[in-house]
Image: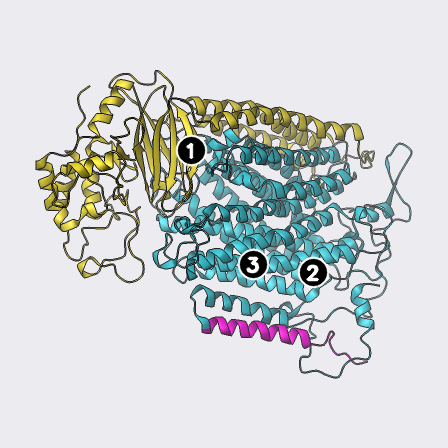
Amino acid sequence: MTTVERAMTTLAPAPPRARLARPTRTSGWTSWFTTIDHKKIGILYGATALVFFVAGGCEALLIRLQLWRPNGTVLTAAMYNQLFTMHGTTMVFLVGMPMAVAFGNYLVPLMIGARDVAFPRINMLGYWVFLFGGIFLYSSFLVGGAPNGGWFGYTPLTSMPYANGFLPSHGPDFWAVGIIMLGIGSVTSGLNFVVTILNMRAPGMTLLRMPVFVWMIFIIAILTVFALPPVTAALIQVYMDRNFHTHFFDAASGGDPLLYQHLFWLFGHPEVYILILPGMGIVSEVLPVFSRKPLFGARVVVFSGIAIGFVGWGVWAHHMLATGIGPAATTGFGIATMAIAVPTGVKIFNWLGTVWGGAIRLKTAMLFALGFIAMFTIGGLSGVMHSIVPSNAQQTDTYFVVAHFHYVLFGGLMFAIFGGLYYWWPKVFGHFLDERLGKINFWTLFVGFNLTFFPMHIVGLQGMPRRTYTYGTGFGWDTLNKLETIGAFIIALSALTLFVNIIVSRVRKVEASADPWDGRTLEWSIPSPAPAYNFLELPEVHAFDDFWHRKYTEDDEGRLVRLPSGGSDGGQHEGDGSNIHLPSPSYWPLVLALGLPIMGYGFVYKNWWTLGVGVFVLMFGITAWTFEPSTAEVDH
Amino acid sequence: MSSSRPIWRGRPVKKVTATVVLCVLAAAGCGQSSTKQQNTLRPSGHIARDDFHIFNAFFWVAVAVGVGVTLATLFAAIKFRSRPGNENPVQTHGNTVLEISWTILPALILMVMAVFTVKMIWDQAAKPKGALEITVTGKQWWWEFQYTNVDSSHQVITANELHIPQGVPVWFTLKSDNVIHSFWIPSLAGKKDVMPGRFNHFQLIADKNLATDGHPKEFFGQCVEYCGLSHADMRNRTFVETKHDFDNWYKTQLKPWTPAQFATFATFNKTYQCSSCHYIQGLGADGKYDAKADADVQSGKATVINVGPNLTHLGDRTSFGGASFDLTLDNLTQWVWDAPRHGTGDFGKYNECPKRGKGGTTGVGTPCLVGMPSFKNDPDHPMSKELAGQIAQFLLDTKTKASG
């Protein structure tokens, strides 16, 4: 019996009809505003992140147009600085993290055999906070200037008071307040994942029988919960310095700009792993399915993920090797950074071991997963180069670094996400994404990606700094920058292919069975698309890749043998689930979240009336949330 | 659903090959000649060469691993394609020996790397003996250089263009009174951040035999920590010279203007108050040369106004505006006249100051902290282009370069 069910049964008899009755609609467009179904919330996260992906992509294209030739005149310096700041902020906070939450939200309960997450309403709150936080950040473009201090927002550039500041606009205020807001959403979803994974696994689903993807979400959820507080503290200090003349980061008054960097990267480096580990999780699911082999050394992959999660806390200052923290500190952080390459390398070799000797089907999802291995390896290797401190002194803050982290986060994370979309689309929507368009999608992305980012290694080593809106002639960077811009537009074309594919596939509707790929994990044991209640009967788990073992066994030579009775439906299709109580929808996460951006504008403009309205909406949401009945009233 | 149709078989290989070739071409395509040396791959100094060598050593390890993994992925994707008859492969769950070895092997490689890395970190952190000492101050958006130990009672203060003797270690002290910058001359040494409230140091040694008398070797660099609007325009040039040329240059940079120059400057300064931001060596309160004030600054007893660069010897430089623009009469005229908006679009880089109100007060909102104002649009005394040209010519005429 799940927590949810237990909660349901102890509620009888139903309370008298309250003023704060819960909404009852679970279909139709209005239901999307009140839903607390983890699957719908997952879809909302994914769709919203894709919209922000387009926004961040457009910013990147403008940046590339400006750098098409030396002394470019497409953008002014002021515009360029806003665009690179918002590109980074968008891709990290509004695309990378929400995408992980999207996949996690949809899949974690299905993969661990649960009917929902532990805190369904908080789950929805996280989404609304993310959406409003994103809109809040982007609204700054319309009201006099977007953030322009970089996604890392180094002080004192960002922290000097508005009136005599180095960045005379409200941009950095929007940035500080916006990131704090998004952090609230991330922490709530992180806590939700931790509690869900620890408490709501199906009978027999021990921790080591959990799919690797669930493990990676578990790790990043823990990282998120612990990583956000330091940066939140730092951003509050930035806000206070700017608006209330505190001196946390003002060296002239005894503050220390370096303090900010420690706080930021204490968040920022775990953040890198928060971004990439879900990608590793997705790949660890896709590769075994399309190789028809179990994940090679699955436990090692899990434990190296844990190791990355731990060691990831001890490497933050490798972002600061040029700041003059001294030879002792650079030695320590350099070596810690080398150390983290070991568990990362182990994963790569284990993925290779997985496909080796398999029966590989090169579906689009598999192509992206294989592309991930190669691209991520390149990104990992250039990362190791940064740990060589003297070499780092030449590379840091150049395009070499830009190349490095795009190989990790685009060639890694985004390849995995694209692959994940093709892989789980049939489960989510009940129809396939078109494979032919999918392959065009992959190959254009592969070519465009490498054309854009590989040359950046070279211009970086040739001395081209990042975050520069222009460059002069005669440095030998012209041709490579042209290639990069061409590549960026090929990437745009590829992204367009994905959107065309989504529309075309929706029209054609090639219906998918419950288990179209011959999958290994529990989500494939239920119908496609997944029904609202997920599982008619909660599954009992006996092994890692439990669903696979219901279908297959091995002969004496270790060859795969299909079990005669094994079926993809696994006996899950009996009944219509109408007797299953699911948590009811709620208005209040939306109302509560709506208070935050209103408060945000109040903080940015120091308009205390606006702030008051925001606080009122927030408190109203919290109060109503507290007093609403815990289920919709139904006739008993 | 199109199940792995034969049309795709083999095709990915060609595409991947094409991509690889493309990448290699891209790599090779950078054989594009550069006339300005700002390149870590062409080190001309001891530190930069060490950085390059240790990079290079691991680079080939990385190439081996990268190519190995990519080829293995490709090979597996082709060789182990699902074919009739092999749909049910042997189920390997792991291999302890393999897994241990691919954990240990990278760890060993990294340990070797770590040894060399740590040694180099400590070598580079030490202050070299007999070094020329220069204090670098990061400004928005230009560099100030003060030579503190060539002759401590006669210290040169200059901007954006660094002159150093070849083969001599140089020890930099980096400081900032505004935001974080990062000082970098890629061909000579790795970068170091310029932090407000801290004094960072780094060393470089330009190779011997880079220059001959009268023919310095020029290197380029720029700020590499995002420092606000014109970060991209905060550049620097370094002239590595023979000892003889360096000494000559040093002497010229200590000479004050002639009385006639002071007199001319006074006419410009009266209206446009150049010296409220720019340092003019020995400029007294009466607009004439003040020997004591000059001596105090040269010996480091007094500090200078340095919102903008020292203009005394601007004519000796090859560039201005954060070393972003070549020093020509046209460029400089435009700069003096209307710095925020250059007619050709080459400028338009520096902060456009908010429009100044009557009487020189700043208008609403933000005061003008950084950057040259537009004198063309000065509300009290709009500058004519002719006057701007005269001022520019005057500044060019400050050239004092003594013949070899």
**Quick one: label 3 or label 2, which is nearer the N terminus?**
2
Are dots 1 and 3 on a single chain?
A: no
Left or right: B335 in relation to B27: left
User: Which chain is mark 2 on?
Assistant: A
From which residue to which does the magenta span run? A609-636
Quickly name the residue at label 3. A182
Quickly name the residue at label 2. A39
Of badges 1 and 3, nearer the viewer stands: 1
If the image is split into quadrants, where does the C terminus of chain A sit?
A: bottom right
Residue B3 visible (yes or no): no
Residue A464 image offset from top left, x and y in percent: 42, 35
Q: CA distance from mark 1 to mark 3?
A: 38 Å
At x 65%, y 70%, the residue is A34
Can you tell which chain is drawn yellow? B
At x 68%, y 41%, the residue is A366
Residue A129 occupies quadrant: bottom right
Quickly name the residue at label 1. B201
Can you tell which chain is drawn cyan? A
Secondary structure beneath dot 1 equals strand
